[in-house]
Amino acid sequence: MNVFEAVVVGSSAGGIRALENLLAPLPNDFPLPIIIVQHLHPESESYLPKILATHCALPVKQAEEREIIQAGRVYIAPPNYHLLIEEDYSFSLSLEPPVRYARPSVDVMFETAVYAYRDKLIGIILTGANDDGSYGVKKLKQMGGYVIVQDPKTAEAEAMPKSAIAAAQVDKILPIEQVGVYLLQLVNRSLRGGIS
């Protein structure tokens, strides 16, 4: 029986609009942390937390080195750093080389989150133009976590959701407009008695 403790999200091309759709239905008492890797240009300003905060009832901030992850917050990976989740539920930032041409990498964040949260983790893959996230999804499913993928037909770029679906037996494939609502239902159900 899974009682979930965290949500990890990966997105790339077209991801800002998809993230707005994901976060908009979540109430201000949503009980889990949401940790997001959105591929950004390495030189870009970290404007994403401000943009998403206008569509989200939860506090949104950029993740910081050694910060302890707290429930009911949305964390964004900073541009040009890999975001890692340590087993003590804190963040670390890395300048290791890009993975699948990306830094931050969805795979790096997902894989480290899996080792911290194990089967208590929900992974979400949204629109994107490469296959970053497919390895992380595979690891998450192997560990017993739950995976939601945006229906590629509703994605601005379908490569990322398609590669996640090909990599593992994902739990749910949904149009972007339904992902946030479904996430809320899933988490509420898990807190009431677990997901078998």
Image (spheres, grey):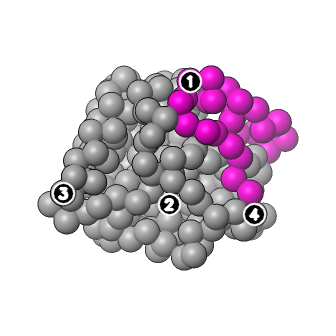
Work out whether mark 1 precedes mark 2 in sequence or the reverse, and give the earlier one.
1
Residue at 28% across, 67% down: 144
Q: Which amino acid does the dot numbered 3 rest on?
A: Gly
* Separation (CA) of disc 4 from disc 1: 25 Å
Q: Nearer the viewer, residue 167 or 24?
A: 24
Q: Is residue 93 visible?
A: no
Question: Would you say the residues marked 4 and 2 are in contact, meaning their CB atoms lie under 8 Å apart?
Answer: no
Residue 118 visible here: yes
Q: Quadrant of residue 173?
A: top left
Tag of residue 123: none
Mark 4 → mark 2, Cα distance in angstroms: 17 Å
Magenta-drawn segment: 40-64
Q: Which mark is residue 110?
A: 2
Label 1 to label 3: alpha-carbon separation: 30 Å
Q: Where's residue 172, x and y in %?
A: 25, 43
* Residue 25, above or below 121: above
Q: Of callouts 2 and 3, which one flags the residue occurring earlier in the amino acid sequence? A: 2
Of the numbered discs 4 and 1, the one sitting upstream in the chain is: 1
Specify whether 192 is left or right of 159: left
The nearer-to-camera label among 1 and 2 is 1
Q: Quadrant of the C terminus?
A: bottom left
- Above or below for 32 versus 52: below
**Kind of residue at disc 1:** His
Q: Give the image location of residue 159, x and y in percent.
A: 45, 38
Question: Label 2 is placed on what type of residue?
Answer: Phe
To which residue does mark 1 refer? 55
The image's mark for residue 193 is: 3
The amino acid type found where label 4 is placed reads: Glu
